[in-house]
Amino acid sequence: MDINIEELENILPRNRSTSTHHDRDLRVKQAAKYLLENCSGIISTLRLTKSIDKAAANLLVEEYLLLFTDDLFEDRDDVDPEGYIKLVPDVIDLIYIGRLLKYEVDLFLYLKTITLPEVWRARLSANGIRLLRTMEIYRNILDTAPSLELVSDEEVENRKYSKSYCVNSWYTYFTMKIPF
């Protein structure tokens, strides 16, 4: 009888820790989905204030949806040079779409968040610009004249369902290249 009680006591803590790990994994996945759907094309590490956000960003690096670089931005007093870039291949294939779907992210909504807000664009380092130029979507954005309007990540969220935001030249150009 004593052996059964000890076995039960040993089993219960394991179930709790498994549940805790499962809950953390779900929270990381939700944070990853948020990063993919609601952040601009570049993400400063300053924006990732919670450990769950950092874990989500690192998971997306492992999934080849984000690229981490330690010198995305110029090294200034007010900006940490480290950051992430949303990876967007020049030709979207089913593997890439599958990676997004793993996080329940719609390709259409994802592509609409690929912007470079002027506040971050002005602070890009030479290496950051070089990395961005390796992807066609960012080359098109960098080659357009910067707008006078400053667009924050919150504004990207507000514009997500706006018709006028959906119809812009780089987005139309890019989606025409998706092979189906």
Image (spheres, helix red, strand yellow):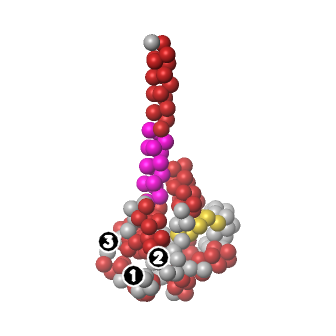
Mark drawn on residue 93:
2
Kind of residue at disc 3:
Tyr
Q: Which residue is mark 3?
A: 161
Calculate the distance from the C-alpha at mark 3 to the C-alpha at mark 2.
24 Å
Q: Residues within 10 Å of mark 1 (few under 14, many from 20)?
A: few
Picture residue at 44% right of the left edge, 85% below the top:
177
Kind of residue at disc 1:
Phe
Splitting the image into 4 quarters, where does residue 79 fall?
bottom right
114 in relation to 34, above or below: below
Calculate the distance from the C-alpha at mark 2 to the C-alpha at mark 1.
8 Å
Task: Measuring from the top left, give residue 135's x and y in whole percent.
Answer: 56, 79
Which quadrant: the N terminus?
Answer: top left
Q: Are marks 3 and 2 in contact (CB under 8 Å)?
A: no
Q: Earlier in the sequence, mark 1 or mark 3?
A: 3
Picture residue at 36% right of the left edge, 79% below the top:
166
Task: Measuring from the top left, give residue 25's x and y in whole percent.
Answer: 47, 48
Q: Which residue is mark 1?
A: 180
Q: Is residue 110 visible?
A: yes
102 in relation to 7, above or below: below
Q: Is residue 138 visible?
A: no
Calculate the distance from the C-alpha at mark 1 to the C-alpha at mark 3.
24 Å
Secondary structure mostly seen in magenta is helix
Is 136 included in the stretch rendered in magenta? Answer: no
Picture residue at 46% right of the left edge, 17% below the top:
5
